[in-house]
Image (cartoon, rainbow, N blue to C red):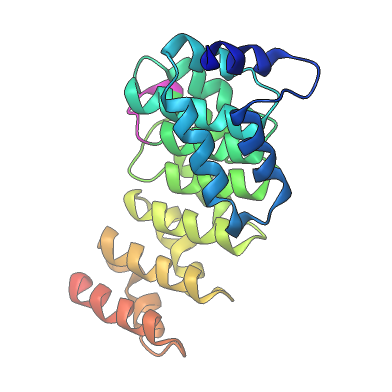
Amino acid sequence: MILAILVAAAFSSAPPACPLTAASCACDDVAPFMRAPADTGVARIVRSMSDAEKRAALRSRDAETRRASLKALASDHPETEIAALLAGAADPSCDVSVAAIGMLGKLRDSRATNEIVRAASSDRCRVKESAMWALSERDGPGVAAALLGGIADSDSRVRSGAAESLGYQHGAGVVDALARGTRDSSKHVRQASVESLGRIRDRRGLAAVLAAAKDPDKHVRLAAAEALGRLQ
């Protein structure tokens, strides 16, 4: 009975009074670091639904309900739910979009790669950042170009994700971009760039790694020491 109420509530134009809605509304009213209890409540209710009810809940007005339903469906049937994940990646809610992109990153499917590449040019920083990490260890049209664009982004989190994922690409353009990344204003970007140069093992990046061995941040210096061991 409660599941029928929950699904009906997802399409109601009036604010629904049900456990799922109460938990979801709580997510909207608190700071992100305080969301865990409310998120858990939504996820627990969604997991008890049938697959048909979860798919219906994907059309809910509430973003947390959509996110929890998408994650529950994709966890059970990742390959067969790719259409739902592709739609979720374009969701107006940043939380839903980020969750969908993260799950698409686990699928070795050209449709998933194409959608992640599209997300890499999003005007939403969190979506773009998620796309950078999801492109790790992938190939295909547009992947390298998306990552090269990402490492030049104005947001350091996007640059860091791109630098990490570029460690699985090859070519002079990749090495040059990572070499520039070792001089980035963000220590996280510098560290990721150094680590990726070590992973690629292209000696054209040796000079940049040697310079990074004198970086003011100890984590960058340690990454440089490890990278030098691979490059020499």
Q: Is residue 147 magenta?
A: no
Q: Tell me which residue sits at (52%, 11%) in the image.
A: 1
Q: Quadrant of residue 163?
A: bottom left
Corner quadrant of residue 78: top left
Residue 35 versus residue 205: which sits nearer the camera? 35
Where residue 169 sits: x, y (%)? 35, 48
Does the image show residue 114? Answer: no
Q: Which residues are magenta?
A: 106-111
Q: Residue at x 35, y 35 (%)?
A: 106
- Across and down, in percent, residue 127 comes to 60, 43
Q: Position of residue 138 (x, y in %)?
A: 35, 38
What type of secondary structure mainly makes up the magenta span?
A: loop
Q: Position of residue 4 (x, y in %)?
A: 56, 10
For this view, does 121 lie left or right of residue 1? right
Q: Is residue 196 shown to the viewer in this render?
A: yes
The one of 79 and 15 positioned closer to us in this rendering: 15
Q: Nearer the viewer, residue 156 or 171?
A: 156
The residue positioned 59% from the left and 76% from the top of the image is: 185
Q: Is residue 190 left or right of residue 197?
A: right
Q: Quadrant of residue 224?
A: bottom left
Residue at the extreme right of the image, as rendered: 14
Is residue 12 rendered to the left or right of residue 138? right
Q: Is 114 placed above or below 173 here?
A: above
Q: Please identify the quadrant where the C terminus is shown.
A: bottom left
Is residue 109 a member of the stretch shown in magenta?
yes
The answer to whether residue 60 is above or below residue 222 is above
Front in this rendered view, residue 171 or 113 = 113
